[in-house]
Amino acid sequence: MRFSEHFKLGLTQPYLDFVDIRLDTDVPVFLEPTAIKSLSSPWGNELSSLLQTFFEEVLTLIRSGNNDKAQRLLSSLNERNEFHLGYSANESRGHGFGSGSAKSVWGGLSQSDAVKTGLLRDLEDTALLIPGIGTDMISDAVCNILRGPLIRYTQDMCSFYGVPLTPDVDSGPIWNAEAGKWETALVPLPITPYGKVILVPKLLVRQRLSYRFDEYYRNYLLPQMQQEHLSARSSLVEVLSNGRERVTKKALMEKYGRDKLAAVRETQLRPRVLDEYREFKESNVSPPLSHEQLSEVEGVEPPDLDSLVLEMKTLAPGRNDADAYEKVIEKIFSVIFYPSLCNPKKQAVLHQGRKRVDITYSNEAKSGFFAWLSLHYCAPLIFVECKNYGKEIGNPEVDQLSSRFGPSRGQVGILVCRSLDDRSLLLERCKDTAKDRRGYMLVLEDKDIENLVRIYNNERNNIFEGFRQQWSDLIN
């Protein structure tokens, strides 16, 4: 049974912001450190800082000889099953750094020249340079280090989707970066027959980690060594029948080794190679899993937007169906704007509760229209107001949305309505608002939503073309 099924959400993975975990075992996806570090939001900065401060603290303790405290910090990354990510075939077990192996992990770190020389900098480096550390262990370690913000995320998602929380649940160890120690608290969390659950954003998971030992050793380190041996005309150089000279990777591995110890030893002589690998990974972050990939991993059907459009069209304008209209718009947007827009919030409270926004999305776009917006305008959040009116949208509705904008929250919103008799007049009102520097509003009617779905289904690369055109008209 999945999380969504247990809590009767009536939603499958494509419509959920988090990984819809199975409660009795794991989903074979992993929290990816490079994906986390690529986030540009304040939340992303918090996550990156927690990862960095924890690992720096462990390395500092090992270098200073404070082995007991280093082991204690590592042992708090112990075996846990509330995240349900990884390769467990049966009941979730977890494979964190502390899964009965804190001493061995500490031993690997403390004895490694990569630590002593400063070659090892980040948690993901351990996948390249420390024997015995693999994908499962790093992902579980990331989950544990980020437990605090992931608990808050879980609480937000439960509030958004209507999942009941059980009060005073043991949080497990939460990393306090300022104090440099683990702490615990009693917090509200969802409880299932399999125990507590901490949810993870689907935006941040991948089917494999970006840092891979074989890739680094074979595609970065060995080619550099091959070039050096060719230049030096060493004994490993072979001359082929056509006169071409070569040095095989097989010959290099036979001479220098093929394990992580060999990688450390040879990287110390060529630290620039590791820097190049890091730089490549930083500038080529693997994209979030698509709806189709997630559906395959989860074993569920891909999103059915056509049925949502039909549902939208059956709703009558007016107050009675206003909530249903808002919900169907959110489901459609959460599919077609993923992974650009994420972490939705309903009825977000502003100004100490004096104002509310129907739906608020975090803008984490790395490409496309919303990424362009974030580079040229203040758009960390995208505000959505849904008006299930049977009447024309006028100045009060435009002013209502513009009043939600702010220099830190963002100044871009989408006004969604059923239909317009005079669309040009509303767009002129939006232009006036933009000229007055009170924010930027895009307008979508039901027919525009239908067109977005059609484009998404048939020519997804053009999904934002209408937005670009409307934005151009808005600012000119």
Image (cartoon, rainbow, N blue to C red):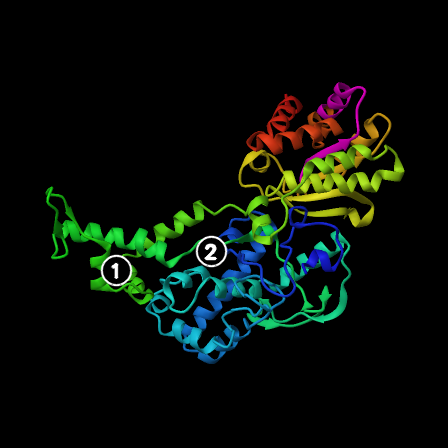
Horizontal side of 193 relative to 98 (left or right) equals right
Question: Which residue sits at x=20%, y=63%?
Answer: 255
Bin the neighbour count of mark 1 within 10 Å (Cα to Cα): few under 14, some 14-19, many 20 and up: few
Q: Residue 73, position in %: x, y?
A: 52, 74
Image height of 48 relative to 101, above or below? above
Bin the neighbour count of mark 2 within 10 Å (Cα to Cα): few under 14, some 14-19, many 20 and up: many
Whether the magenta-drawn stretch holds residue 425 is answered as: yes
Q: Residue 214, position in %: x, y?
A: 35, 57
Amino acid beneath label 2: Leu
Of the numbered discs 2 and 1, the one sitting upstream in the chain is 2
Q: Residue 155, position in %: x, y?
A: 71, 59
The one of 212 and 34 positioned closer to us in this rendering: 212
Question: Which residue sits at x=83%, y=35%?
Answer: 315
Specify the segment rendered in magenta: 410-431
Could you tell me if residue 363 is visible in this image? yes
Element class at badge 2: loop
Q: Which quadrant is the C terminus positioned in?
A: top right
Q: Which quadrant is the N terminus positioned in?
A: bottom right
Whether the magenta-drawn stretch holds residue 363 is answered as: no
Question: Which residue sits at x=71%, y=69%?
Answer: 193
Q: Quadrant of residue 457?
A: top right
Amino acid beneath label 1: Leu
Image height of 410 relative to 64, above or below? above
Question: Which residue sits at x=86%, y=39%?
Answer: 321
**Number of the label disc, if any, that sits on residue 29:** none
Q: Label 1, on which residue? A: 269
Q: Label 2, on which residue? A: 209
Q: Residue 374, position in %: x, y?
A: 58, 38
Horizontal side of 25 relative to 101 (left or right) equals right
